[in-house]
Amino acid sequence: MLILKNVTAVQFEPASVRENVDIAIDGAEIREVGSNLSTKYPGAEVKEMGGKLVMPGIVCSHNHFYSGLSRGIMANIAPSPDFISTLKNLWWRLDRALDEESLYYSGLICSLEAIKSGCTAVIDHHASPNYIAGSLNTLRKGFLKAGLRGMTCFETTDRNGGVRELQAGVEENIAFARQIDQAKAEGKEPYLVEAHIGAHAPFTVSDEGLGMLREAIKATGRGLHIHAAEDSYDVSHSHDKYGKDLIVRLAEFDLIDAKTLVAHGLYLSSDDIALLNERDAFLVHNARSNMNNHVGYNHRLAEYRNLALGTDGIGSDMFEELKFAFFKHRDAGGPLWPDSFTRFLWNGNRLLERNFGAKFGRLEAGYKADLTLCAYDCPTPLAAQNIGGHLAFGMGSGSVDSVMVEGRMVYENGAFPFDVEPLYAEAAKVAARLWQRMDALD
């Protein structure tokens, strides 16, 4: 047993702040939160925390680890005046250039940087059309090496190879889900990585593909993770080709339920939103990515029953993401305040609960010991009523001191338990080769 002694326990939902308490951790779970626990558990290891803030783990609810080696990219990217051309000229060339080596380093570096930013879990959405079979396990290796919890899936699409590509994507999703089931049954490794069934935006998935996804969900018991209405083209395409709204079309294939994660949703209709709410599905808002891609703003955030925050591949700094999401919302005339965005950030833990079958997101007995620890010099009172204000206007990823996942410190006192410098050096070499392959593509 491990006791984190003398912490400031900050819980997002329900909001609470408890000073000078101890947290007893037994294996992968919290045993107790209270005072003087070292006397109650005399044989436990005790770590004096000196009043550091301890929060339930922070979750990035939508990311693209395949983009991890795109930072500062030097490749011949044609002018891209709109979102579709940005996809074709940049991101769809990058994902086609990925191989096993570049994907591993991309995923590993993203996992390390997520932890360093205070994340205990990331929900990933993957694409590598020329390296499909086995790609999700390659990403899983990076998660496990870093010690990060997460989920991943393959972005099923027909944009490059028609039905054969659809089939390959679905098969990879199913194979990975079954691999996770086997790993859980064997219990040889920590249960840190789960599976979704992935799909790209509906405009690149035919009805035949949606039928395949429905069968994959039935076969694996997993939920759908999909982009939808990130750009208005996705909506107009659905109306033009299928004569119906996006989520209505997905629902007709039984793809919308409590495990469904829809990313973006800027242009969803009222009927679409009502369907997501009725079926208890999640929308994940990605403020910085939407701004970067100039796709517009989602003015209807307050209408969603379940809303979480993600980055869509722009790192995993969820402190930064919360700030951008809040400030952009205020700039757009929105009515929500920081406490709402704190709840949206916390909601990532609800996604984990639905998929891992365990308790996440509270500092209470029986909940997973996934914790974010911060050294935050607080110049004003910190209370349940103003946690959101401290997150929006003060605290940042630079405050992150340590991160615990599954009861194990994967980042402590600002350092990883292994040397990461050689990994970064090798990643730089791999990235240069990746960019060269991009330039060789049409």
Image (cartoon, rainbow, N blue to C red):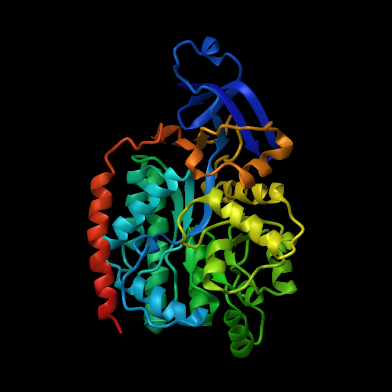
Give the side of residue 237 with respect to residue 408, left or right.
Answer: right
Count of picture labels: 0
Give the side of residue 136 with respect to residue 300, left or right.
Answer: left
Q: Is residue 190 above or below residue 44?
A: below
Q: Residue at x 74, y 73 (%)?
A: 271
In this orientation, does residue 286 appear? Answer: no
Q: Is residue 166 above or below residue 314?
A: below
Q: Is residue 412 above or below residue 344?
A: above
Q: Residue at x 53, y 65 (%)?
A: 289
The residue lying toward the viewer, choosing from 323 and 225, is: 323
Q: Residue at x 74, y 38 (%)?
A: 385
Which part of the image, by quadrant, shows the C terminus?
Answer: bottom left
* Identity of the residue furthest to the right in this view: 335
In this orientation, does residue 404 appear? Answer: yes
Q: Position of residue 226 (x, y in %)?
A: 53, 67
The residue lying toward the viewer, choosing from 148 and 357, is: 148
Q: Position of residue 129 (x, y in %)?
A: 35, 73
Give the side of residue 273 with respect to residue 261, left or right.
Answer: right
**Occupied quadrant, residue 40:** top right
Which part of the image, by quadrant, shows the N terminus?
Answer: top left
Q: Position of residue 341 (x, y in %)?
A: 66, 51
Q: Residue at x 50, y 38 (%)?
A: 399
The residue lying toward the viewer, choosing from 324 and 160, is: 324
